[in-house]
Amino acid sequence: MSRWILTNNPKILSLHPTALWIDGGPLEVMLECRKKVHDGYPLLAHPLTGDIHLIHNPFRTLILDEKRNEIDLVSLTCIEESAERIRLFYREHRNFQDLEDYQDIDFDLFQRVTGPKRGH
């Protein structure tokens, strides 16, 4: 696989069945992503993309680029700092009525990273 999509968002998985499903919260997604970064896959976008209030979003989708021969230190720093912020500030969301809204927000952020307007 050249690129990786890691997600705990069922909406992403239904549209991208080859995504790596992470059964857990946003921290588990971050920790699995960190393993991939250590394997040489750099991040395509910051793991905490969006408004700071979205740190409480229980859904997280991360995208890694094609494998490189070395660890991308910027990606490694980014994922380590993001995982630490999740550890410190994330609190499990208990309002189940909002879960679909949070899935939609995560999906929208995913689309912004992978959409046609992305510059490279």
Image (cartoon, grey):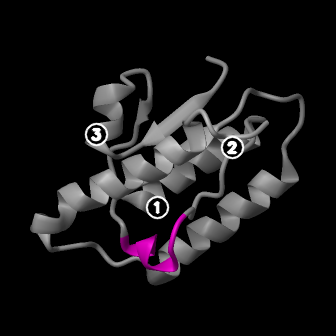
The tag on residue 93 is none
Q: Earlier in the sequence, mark 1 or mark 3?
A: 3
Residue at numbered disc 1: 27
As shown in the figure, which amino acid type bears the numbered disc 3?
Answer: Lys
Residue at numbered disc 3: 11
As shown in the figure, which amino acid type bears the numbered disc 1?
Answer: Leu
Residue 11 image position (x, y, % from top left): 28, 39
Residues rendered magenta in the picture: 50-56
Residue at the extreme right of the image, as rendered: 70
Q: Earlier in the sequence, mark 3 or mark 2?
A: 3
Magenta span main SS: helix
User: Which element carries disc 1, helix, strand or loop?
Assistant: helix
Residue 74 image position (x, y, % from top left): 83, 56
As shown in the figure, which amino acid type bears the numbered disc 2?
Answer: Leu
Q: Quadrant of residue 38?
A: top right
Q: Which residue corresponds to the image point at 67% horizontal and 40% vertical from the top-left?
A: 118
Residue at numbered disc 2: 44
Residue at the extreme front of the image, as rendered: 117
42 in the magenta segment: no
As measured in the structure, the alpha-carbon distance from the residue carrying label 1 to the one carrying label 3 is 19 Å
